[in-house]
Amino acid sequence: MEGFRHSMPISVRFRDVDAMGHVNNAVFFTYLETARVEYVRQVVHRSQPFKLAGVGLILAQISCQFKKPIFYGQTVEVGTRVLEMRNSSFVVEQCIETDSQVAALAEGVMVYYDYPAGKSVRIPDEVRLRVTSFEANVEVR
């Protein structure tokens, strides 16, 4: 997947398809979430387990442009990359492709969040280093 160092295949399941015969728009967000979580697991946290309480990443915003339908039996490839790293958040871009054609483009904001305190916190330096080392062109603010 061109321009994305991290990508993952996802098989379209029968349950993903709506009455119109194509993947329902809401399911696109599930594909995006699956790939985003895998990116966080592999790049951001690496071998560290996800925390169920305390400080962790939350999705604060997401938007999606739907470009072409996806159908049962196809395999999609979902690319994920960090475009920008701010004080307490990442701007993440994602692309869903099928048959080497763009089916959807998405952009979201993930925030480091302290659940007990109820507020965002600065991205740890070790995480900044992991992401900037993995991504070639991350804008750091």
Image: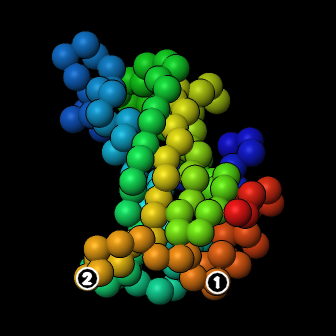
Dot 2 or dot 1, earlier in sequence = 2
Residue type indicated by callout 2: Pro
Which residue is at 28% across, 74% downward? 118
Which residue is at 59% across, 46% downward? 93
The residue that label 1 is drawn on is: 125
User: Looking at the image, which is closer to me, 2 or 127?
Assistant: 127
Q: Quadrant of residue 44?
A: bottom right
Q: Which mark is residue 116?
A: 2
Query: What is the secondary structure assignment of the residue under circle 1?
Result: helix
Q: Quadrant of the N terminus?
A: top right
Relative horizontal placement of residue 63, taking residue 86 as reference (left or right): left
User: Looking at the image, which is closer to me, 62 or 134?
Assistant: 62
Residue type indicated by callout 1: Asp
Q: Quadrant of the C terminus?
A: bottom right
One can see residue 8 in this view: yes
Above or below, comparing residue 110 to residue 57 in the picture: above
